[in-house]
Amino acid sequence: MVTIQELEIMERGLLAVNRAKELGRPILISEVHKMDTINPLSFFNIGKEHYCGERFFWKDPTDETFLIGLGIAKQIQTDQASDRFFHVEKEWEKFLEDCLIFNPYTEIAVGPVMFGGFSFDPHKEKTDLWSKYADSLFHTPKYLLSIIRGQTFLTTNIVCTPQEDPFLFKKISEERNQLLTSLQHKERINTAALLETREIKPEQWKKTVDGVVKELTEGPLKKVVLARELRLVFNDQVEAEAVLNNLFNQQHESFIFAFESNGDCFIGASPERLVKKQANEVYSTCLAGSIPRGKTEKEDQQLGQLLLNDQKNLIEHGFVVEMIKEALEESCEEIILPDKPQLMKIRDIQHLYTPVIGKCHKDASLLLLVERLHPTPALGGLPKDEAVVKIRQVEELDRGFYAAPLGWVDYRKNGEFAVSIRSGLIQGNEVSLFAGCGVVADSDPESEYLETSLKFKPMLRALGGN
C-alpha cells in the first residue's frame, strides 16, 4: 500500500496558512496522489468508525467513475426554495476562490468535488422522515477516493484558517496514512434480519391514483407521477455497508449511491442518468415506460418487443424525450438524438431508453442544466410545473431526496447527476423504500400499484427481503 510523505503536505500547508493570512479568510488546500488499486467498498467500510454519518459512495453504470468520500471538509446546505441551484453553485465557486489545488493528474483525476443533491420539491411540507437532510445538501469530503477509468487517486481536502496551527498538517498526514494502513484489515459487516414490511396506506394511494385519473380526463394535465412508501423494520441496526455490497453485486449496471447525513443514509441503485457534463459535451438519458423481465430468454424478448410497440408507453417516453431535448437546447449548439427508443434491461425490469448527447460551451453550468431537467416527465409529469403542484397537493409522501437529482460537481465544472430512484432511507433499524409510476388518463390504480411493487424489488432484495 502506498503511503504519502509528510513533508509534502507540511510545506503546502504553510503556503495555505500564509495565503489565508493574506486574504483574511479560510481557504481550501487540496492535493491529489496516485495510488495502488483500492477496493471502493473497502474504503467506504473503513470510514465507519471515525466518519460514520459523513460518508458517500458513487459508482456509474459502466464503472468508469467511482467516488467515495470520508469526512466533511466543507458543507453547503440551504432550505431556501428559490434559486437553490444558483445558490449552491455560487457558494461552490466562492469556496474554490484562491484555493490551492495540487493535482498533477489533471487529464484524468477529478480533484476536489462536492457531492450531494436536492430534494424533489422544496415547497412540499417537510416531515420528520427527511429531517436530517436539508433541501439542498452537498459535502466536500476530507478524503476522496476516486477511481477514474481504472486509475486510483486519493484527494485530501483541508480548509485552512488564518490562525491555523501548522501541526494540523502533520496530524492530517498521520491520519491519512493510518486510514490507508487500515485497508489491510477486513471490516466485519453485520446483516440485520427483516422482521416486518409495512405498506403505508396502500388503499388510500390507489384512491389518489383514481382521483388523479379523473382529473386527467377533464383538465390540462397529461400525466402525474405518484409515489408511495414501504416501511421495513429489522431486528438490528441496518448497516449501509451490507446494503451497498448487495447493490454492488445485484444491480451493478446502475448508478449505485449512498449519502449519509447526521446518522441517516440515503442509498440506492438507479438506472437513470439525469445529466453528465464533461468539458463541452453533455449526456442525458430518457427513461420512461417499463415492463417486467421474462422468466426465460424467449419470454424476456417477447416482453421487450411488447414494450417497444406499446403505444401508451411510447407516447409517455416521447414526452420525456421532447422535454429533455428542449431543456438541453438552451445550453447546447447541437443535440444528437436517436430516432426511436431501445431497451434498457436491468435485473427485475426493462425500460424504454433513449440516450441524448449535446455539444455545449465548456463553461456551461451543470447545475443550471440540472435545474432545467428536474423533474423530467418520468418523475414529475406534464406539464411540469402543474404536475409538481398536483403531487404536492395529493401525495401524502414526503419524497425528500427520492426521485430528485443526486450527484457531484468538480472544481472544473464537470460532473454527473442521477435521478435517485430505486432507493431507500436507512434510519437505525428501520428503512423507508420509495417507488412511483406515471399516471395518465387511462391508468388503472391496481396496475399502477403492481408496477410500484415491482420497482420496490431491487432495494427489498438488497435489504434481505423478497
Image (cartoon, helix red, strand yellow):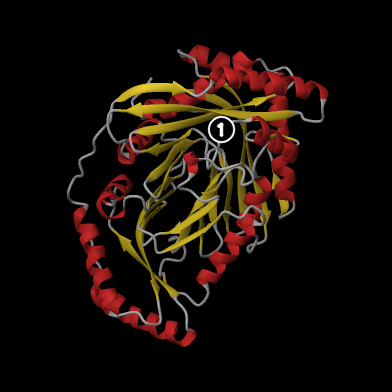
Residue nearest the observer in this picture, 296 or 368: 368
- Examine the rendered structure and indicate whether residue 437 appears above or below residue 112: above
Q: Residue 7 in the image: state x and y as whole percent.
A: 25, 78
Tell me the crowding category of disc 1: few under 14, some 14 to 19, or many 20 or more residues within 10 angstroms, Cα based: many
- Residue at image x 55%, y 58%? 414
Which quadrant of the structure image shows residue 366?
Answer: bottom right
Please state if 382 lies on the left or on the right of 6 as rendered. right
Residue of label 1: 397
Query: Taking the image as drawn, is residue 218 in sight?
Result: yes
Which quadrant of the structure image shows residue 164?
Answer: bottom left
Query: Taking the image as drawn, is residue 407 in sight?
Result: no
- Residue at image x 33%, y 26%? 464
- Examine the rendered structure and indicate whether residue 411 appears above or below residue 392: below
Residue type of the residue flagged with mark 1: Leu
Image quadrant holding the C terminus, namely top left
Dot 1: what SS? Answer: loop
